[in-house]
Amino acid sequence: MYAIIATGGKQYKVCEKDILEVEKLNAEVGAKVEFEALMTSNDGKADFGAKKVVAEVLAHGKGEKVLIAVYKKKNTHQKTQGHRQPFTKIKIVSIGK
């Protein structure tokens, strides 16, 4: 059985006991978080009803640094900037009703 959930402007296909990194959530480590399932599938049968997906927050962190470089030729303009996207690591506990 798997479900499709949406969080942080993205959609994820999840099964029970999956561990994934999503956009940062405002929840304490060890807390349970509920998501609305957009779709669930069991043995090839799709169900679009309102089911809950329960996940446990494992950790918070930051991703790898992404460098952004701006360069304008024929001028002496150069700029470099870095960005580290915050994330939350979650574990899917149950896909239920």
Image (tube, rainbow, N blue to C red):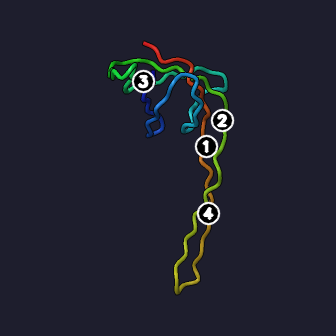
Three-letter amino acid code at the position of disc 4:
Gln
Q: Residues within 10 Å of mark 1 (few under 14, many from 20)?
A: some
The residue carrying mark 4 is 81
Residue at image position (64%, 26%) is 28
- Does dot 4 land on a helix, a strand or a loop? strand
Q: Residues within 10 Å of mark 2 (few under 14, many from 20)?
A: some
**Residue type, label 2:** His
Residue 11: image x %, image y %? 43, 36
Residue 47, quarter of the rendered image: top left
Residue 60 numbered tag: 2
Q: Nearer the viewer, residue 4 or 84?
A: 4
Q: Is residue 92 left or right of residue 11?
A: right
Image: 73 above or below 49: below
Point out the frontmost of discs 3 and 1: 3
Residue ID for mark 1: 86
Q: CA distance from mark 4 to mark 1?
A: 16 Å
In which quadrant will I find the N terminus?
A: top left
Q: Earlier in the sequence, mark 3 or mark 1?
A: 3
Q: Which residue is disc 3 drawn over?
A: 36
Position of residue 38 measured from the top left corner of the image (x, y, whole percent): 37, 27
Callouts 4 and 1 close, C-beta under 8 Å: no
Q: CA distance from mark 4 to mark 2?
A: 23 Å
Residue 70 percent coordinates (x, y)? 55, 71
How far apart are the two marked residues, 3 and 1, measured between alpha carbons?
22 Å
Q: Amino acid at mark 1?
A: Pro
